[in-house]
Image: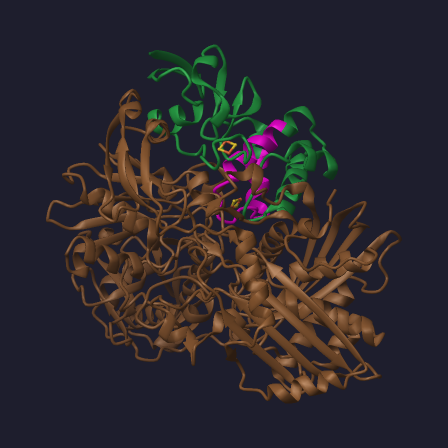
Amino acid sequence: MTITLKLNGKTHDVEAEPGTPLLWVIRDELKLTGTKFGCGVASCGACTVHLNGEPVRSCQTYVEDVEDAEITTIEGIDNPIAKAVQQAWMELDVVQCGYCQSGQVMSAVGLLSENPKPSAEEIDEYMYGNACRCATYQRIRAGIQRASEIMEA
Amino acid sequence: MTLNTSRRGFLKGAAAATAVLLVGTRPDGAIAAANAENTALNPFVKINADGRVTAIIKHFEKGQGPATGLSTLIAEELGLSMDQIDYEFAPSNPQVYNNLLFGPFQGTGGSTAMANSFVQYRNAGAAAREMLIQAAAQEWGVASTDLSIENGVIQGAGKSASLGDFVAAAAQIEAPAEPRLKDPSEFRLIGNPDVRRLDSEIKGNGKAIYAMDLHLPNQMIAMIARSPQKGGTVTGFDDTGSKDVKGFIRAATLPTGAGVVVYAENTWAAMQARDALDVSWDLSAAETRSSDEIRDEILAALEAEPEYNVTKADQAATLSAIDDAATVVERTFYFPLLAHAPMEPLNCTIEATADGGIVLHDGSQMPTGPHMALAQIFQLPMEKIQINTLLAGGSFGRRATPDADYQVEAALAFALTDRSRPVKLVWSREDDLRSGYYRPAFGHKVRVGLDSDGHILGWDHRIAGQSIMKGTAFEAMMVHDGVDHSSVEGVSDTPYQIPGMFVGLTDTKKATSTLWWRSVGHTHTAYAMEVMMDLAAEAAGVDPVEYRLRHLTGGKDQERLAGVLKLAAEKASWGAAPDGRTQGIAVHKSFGSYAAEVVEISGNAEDGVKIEKVTCAVDCGLAVNPDVVKAQMEGGIGYGIGHVMRDQITLTGGEVDQYNFPDYEPLRIGDIGAIDVHVVPSAEAPTGVGEPGTPPSAPALANAVARASTDLILSDLPMTESNVSFV
Ligand code: FES
Ligand code: FES
């Protein structure tokens, strides 16, 4: 069936069967590969995108359920919070292999959007579902705090 | 910076019409230079007429930072700033881009990327500098000693010019056989903690292209249904259900019988079509044991006479010294199977070229392995196979199997087609955990005899487990007199001065495919050694740091190990933990580097342990990129601790019990507090950093947990198997 998606500010008509995870439409149909596949069962966060500004796991979000939503992927996120997060990520060299990092950035933006000055505990709680096999956690924590400072400045 | 990720971008850019200077080595190892037409050379540095400089990276980037590190070496010697250098991954060529520590074999592993490239890449940068300066000196009629290159500008004698202006002339000059390398006092980039990674930006904005992200025109996705028990073979399949999946193309049995390939138009269709497939298996030769049986087999082997006397020590003397000891400390440890679970599931893409060749697109850790395997499968000479190395989303050893497992699967799947469409093989996370290769299970039984003053009289150390190297291409290098060094490294070569040490090894049967896992044998040997050291110190009534230092005298190895031990203890305020906190320490040498770690916890085994803080000191010789070194320690510690807390692969009737991350739970952000890394300043040659952070982390945690808890015997791992809970 044809499904109309609003993604990164544009409208796309895509062919997909009901029950298809949004992740695979984004990656395979729209060829936006910044959103990653890590587990497929909502337990790693590599596939995190925003739905109306809120982080969700696109591997467990079905395409027919998001026709009316504003979807944003790592390629389309460019608000001041995202810029602050990405700048902080570069200043602190958060990444290692980098494969989880699109998802980390999308979740970090989600956190800072609702809580511009999170404590370390609040970061740990919010970011719990974003696994990093390279264990870059301490820099993720520092990166979010640094982004918070950049946003204040 | 821009990373060239176009399909055929690798090195083909060198064929541009404009002048280019390539500096690298000839197959015989001599430094050589060329312009684009000369193909007898594989370069490490490429300079275009527009002055852009590109480092050609022979190692693959799975996060450990070699792309930044090797680019730093070139930039340093050539006189560039870091924003003036790009990088590309080298093509597969075992003669030129080999790991100098592996022989004629290109590969990344054993934490060797910097150690084997340090002089090679600096030579290339320095040779390019001398040639460019010489070309400028000739043109300007000045002495080359009057010229230098700073920030990409050739300057001196009142003149200045861009590197690009002299690329054509420099390419006509013979490369110096021994260019002058900078004295460490002249370094501006090497050792500079402010140098940033070259790949941070593209990995933070989603633009980095991993093998999984490749979309070749007209590609098919292949997924494979594999035997539920390792070693089973296909007897037939029914794809009726698969045919209902939109996008399903067809299914076919692999010629090896190891599985059924499902081809589909996209990944989701491939996943669904594979799920709908009904495969029947011949399991008569398949693994049927459970992990409990594997454990029993290993523990029984520890009680029997060891197969090998590893260090040819006098076993009888050790046993009688222990018999005479005032105190004997004894412990048996069991280490389970572990999966690597890199974040990017395994995958690679194969396509045919118009001239009958094959291209493999892969985040390949050891390109020479798949290169040779593909040459054999397709019956093509090596030069007809190209490997396009892409970024890899982690590896920890998994992307380097001796039998090139997933690349061979992809090649066989491709060979079953008419070759008109590229085939991308994708593994799911379930495939990764269930059909994978594992850190083999190991057991250690250690008995340490102490005299009444707490001095060690004898140390009887038995190890049993599955050899990783036997039966692989690495056997000749790693197995001597029957002993697989990777089974005993970290024990048989311990820098501790231990009197009366005997090390016995017994190889047990292969339970499943075994594979090196970040830090290989040290994953279990460091744990056994360092927990025993703590127990011996406790029995002797001596502080664990002090007790270790007593056994670290007499040589450079001991001095460097003692150095990191003291530094970590000092930085962690060893012995002065805040109220409610308990510390544990461990120190270990691996891959030429020395690392000590102090883990500080609150709570205890019964009420729940919280890991509050880790302090690490590392001596890895000269730290080329100190911040990358710190990041590697942080990551190595997290990797070691995450698994030892709660992860294991178990089998029931030969089938893997775990499915996905929910039952192979990765370390999470809240599991571990701050990690504070201190890098020892050093002028020694650089040694490994990707792995040495891992070995001390688990025993340091174990030592802290044991001290905080009453009557806790941490013999079975992960710790949750020894009744430790975490909060
Ligand atoms: S791929 Fe969606 S959470 Fe892991
Ligand atoms: S950076 Fe590798 S998984 Fe997070």
Can residue B268 be seen here? The reply is yes
Q: Residue at x 43, y 77 (%)?
A: B482
Q: Is residue B357 left or right of residue B79?
A: left
Q: Quadrant of residue B96?
A: bottom left
Dominant secondary structure of the residues highlighted in magenta in the image: helix
The magenta segment is A84-110
Q: Visible in this render: residue B692?
A: no
Residue B552: % across, % down: 69, 81
Q: Nearer the viewer, residue B285 or B162?
A: B285
Q: Is residue B491 magenta?
A: no
Q: Is residue B720 above or below residue A48?
A: below
Q: Which chain is green?
A: A
Chain letter tied to brown: B
Q: Is residue B427 left or right of residue B173?
A: right
Q: What is the quadrant of residue B125 in the picture?
A: bottom left
Task: Name the residue at the front extreme.
Answer: B284
